[in-house]
Image (cartoon, grey):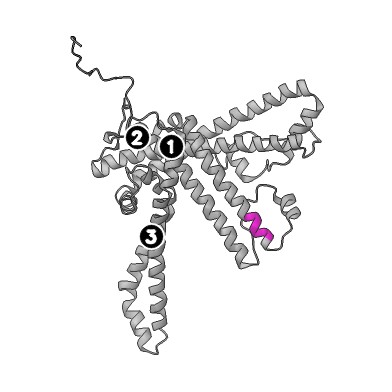
């Protein structure tokens, strides 16, 4: 049974409630965690290759080296950039997986699982990468042609005349389109996973076609839906984070009453290992960047060492933080997916909700009444 889907802004307004789904949050959190672990490992390798000792890295940044480092070695810089690229890919997959679940629900498949979304999103990673590589190849070819044209400018007199005559047409016009392609690629980090999730089959040409047509024909509607989804996601994740914070406080109070000072020191040791004042934590614990309305995560006392129990507890806190980020990503992905269904209806007169699900679905609510004919004499 399909839900009653309204092809207007009300579809996006339902994102916080629709995004509060265990399978959406799990799928988004899974890829966010994988992307961050890839970034963390490669950043440590880059710093080690650049000659920084492991003890200094751990004491200075711990498990959260969230900054752009001024590397001396070119290889170290390349390793760090690869880590950033993998983190971006993880974020794109974190958008793709909840969007897949959203589109399947719009098609009537409410039993599409998180594991299916994770597997399918990983298989469609090739479509995303090939689409981005196609855009990058276009920009690279145009840049190469510009370099060759610049070499022609070295010819005395004639080279300057050629560049002067050809500057507006085609050099400048080509570069204007190239800048637009770069802008499309940047927007595609958020929009492309939603488009690929809305496909029946992962097709590079169709993904690029929809990416350009959405930005060209429906830029204001997409910008409005993206802004609305982002605002809703930030507000909903703030409430979600505050609920988690109070639950952690209650667990601390309850466990200390039973375990005494040892448990209290374990909590303090776990919190001491976390960057509680980092910009990322401040972003999550405030209602909106720049506003003072929010809550502050602080240690509940002094003392505490990095015991095995404290390390495991710190890992648990990190996982809870990832879940909060997963919910925020889930709301953004759900809002954009539902908004994309509206845009396809208005742009192409095409209704995604009328498509058949990617997986066969048995309608247990409305079973078939057909039965085989039986011979009463048998």
Return the x and y of residue 91 as percentages of the image width and height. 50, 46
Mark on residue 134? 3
Rendered residue at 31%/80% (across/down): 165
Above-or-below relation of 295 to 38 = above
Q: Which residues are magenta?
A: 43-48
Q: Is residue 266 above or below residue 42?
A: above
Real-space CA distance between mark 3 and mark 2, rounded to the nearest whole angstrom:
30 Å
Q: How busy is the neighbourhood of tag 3: few (under 14 within 10 Å), some, or many (20 plus)?
A: some
Instruction: Note whether residue 125 is visible.
Output: yes
Asked if one can make out residue 234 in the rendered structure from this viewpoint, the answer is: no
Name the residue nearer the viewer: 27 or 233. Answer: 27
| Labels 1 and 2 touching (C-beta < 8 A) | yes
Give the mark nearest the N terminus, 3 or 2: 3
Tag 1's secondary structure?
A: helix
> Which residue is disc 1 drawn over?
116
Instruction: Indicate the quadrant containing the C terminus: top left, top right, bottom left or bottom right.
Output: top left
Image coordinates for residue 296, horizontal then vertical, percent? 66, 35
């Amino acid at each position: 049974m399909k839900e009653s889907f309204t092809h207007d802004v009300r579809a996006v307004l339902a994102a916080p409630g629709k995004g509060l789904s265990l399978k959406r949050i799990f799928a988004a959190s899974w890829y966010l965690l994988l992307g961050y672990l890839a970034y963390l490992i490669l950043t440590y390798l880059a710093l080690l290759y650049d000659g920084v000792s492991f003890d200094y890295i751990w004491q200075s940044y711990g498990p959260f080296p969230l900054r752009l480092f001024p590397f001396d070695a070119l290889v170290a810089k390349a390793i760090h950039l690869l880590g950033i690229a993998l983190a971006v890919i993880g974020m794109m997959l974190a958008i793709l997986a909840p969007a897949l679940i959203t589109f399947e629900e719009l098609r009537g498949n409410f039993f599409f699982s998180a594991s299916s979304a994770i597997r399918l999103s990983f298989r469609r990673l090739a479509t995303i990468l090939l689409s981005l590589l196609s855009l990058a190849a276009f920009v690279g070819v145009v840049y190469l042609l510009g370099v060759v044209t610049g070499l022609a400018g070295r010819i005395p007199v004639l080279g300057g005349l050629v560049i002067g005559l050809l500057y507006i047409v085609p050099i400048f016009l080509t570069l204007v389109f190239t800048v637009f392609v770069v802008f499309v690629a940047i927007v595609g980090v958020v929009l492309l996973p939603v488009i690929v999730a809305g496909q029946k089959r992962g097709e590079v040409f169709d993904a690029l076609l929809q990416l350009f047509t959405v930005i060209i024909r429906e830029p204001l509607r997409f910008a409005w839906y993206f802004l609305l989804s982002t605002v809703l996601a930030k507000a909903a994740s703030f409430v979600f984070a505050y609920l988690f914070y109070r639950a952690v406080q209650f667990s601390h109070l309850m466990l200390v009453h039973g375990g005494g000072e040892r448990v209290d020191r374990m909590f303090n040791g776990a919190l001491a290992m976390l960057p509680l004042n980092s910009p990322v934590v401040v972003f999550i614990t405030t209602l909106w960047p720049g506003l003072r309305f929010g809550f502050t995560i602080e240690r509940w006392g002094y003392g505490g060492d990095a015991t095995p129990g404290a390390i495991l507890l710190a890992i648990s806190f990190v996982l809870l933080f990832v879940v909060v980020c997963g919910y925020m990503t889930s709301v953004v992905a759900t809002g954009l997916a539902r908004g994309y269904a509206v845009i396809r209806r208005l742009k192409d007169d095409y209704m995604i909700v009328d498509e058949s699900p990617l997986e066969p679905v048995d309608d247990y609510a409305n079973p078939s009444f057909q039965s085989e004919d039986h011979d009463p004499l048998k």
